[in-house]
Amino acid sequence: MTAALFEQREDPGKAASATLAVLVHIALAVLLVYGIRWQTRSPEAVEVELVRAVPAPPVAAVEPPPEPAQPPKVAPKPEPKVEPKPAPPKPDIALKEKEKPKPEPKPVPKAEPRPEPDKASRQLMAEALKREQQQLEARKAEQELAQMKAAQAAAARSKATADYIGRIRGKIKSNIVLPPDIKGNPEAIFDVVQLPSGEILSVKLKKSSGHPAYDNAVERAILKSSPLPKPEQGDLFSRSLELKFRPLEE
């Protein structure tokens, strides 16, 4: 019974849907037909009328108005040079530091007059001066005596040395055999080295006499004289001697 009621009952929206579908199909068919006709329609011809252009009248050349004369340029006035003001002279060390006042000279104290020495003081001063003069004279005498003694000792030493060298030369001369052909009085000088005992170590000719025979004769005589004489005072001994010989000397 329920199914029969449902089938007998109509759906109100079904009729509206069917109607809407029919309208849509009709509108679609109209659009198709109209579109085909619009595409198959031939375009209408367009007529164009050509008109010859009339030449325009010549236009007179218009000269541009003259440019207004420019005013003459005025040279700018030179700006006056401002000379720098000379710097003020520096004060002479601030006027020598405002000229310090010179210190006032201190008064020199006057020397007090010395009191004159009395008679006793004068006598003491005279005695002291006399003693000083005596001492000076004594020292002077001592110096003179010492100088005299030194001179005497030097003279004595010189004499002893001369005697010592003379004895050596005398012994050597006694052994010289002079060659027969010597002319003049030439001098030969020899350096002799000896021992404290007087024995001769070496003889060397320092200066030739110019006569070789005489030089050889002297050298042989020196060697023959070894040992040489000894000095009387031991302090007069000299290891090195310089001996001079002449053929005509005594």
Image (cartoon, helix red, strand yellow):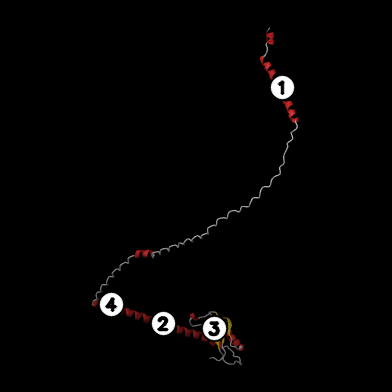
Tell me if residue 226 can be seen: no
Residue 192 is drawn in which quadrant?
bottom right
Residue at numbered disc 1:
26
* N-term mark: 4 or 1: 1
Neighbor class of circle 1 (other Cα within 10 Å; few <14, some 14-19, many 20+) is: few
Q: Residue 242 — which label?
A: 3
- Mark 2 is on which residue type? Gln
**Label 3: how many residues lie within 10 Å, few (<14), some (14-19) or many (20+)?**
few
Regarding mark 2 in the picture, which secondary structure is present there? Answer: helix
Judged left or right of residue 212, residue 114 is left
Q: Which residue in the protein does label 2 denote?
A: 147
* Residue 154 visible here: yes
Q: Position of residue 80 (x, y in %)?
A: 46, 62
Mark seen at residue 125: 4
Q: Earlier in the sequence, mark 3 or mark 2?
A: 2
Of labels 1 and 2, the one closer to you: 1
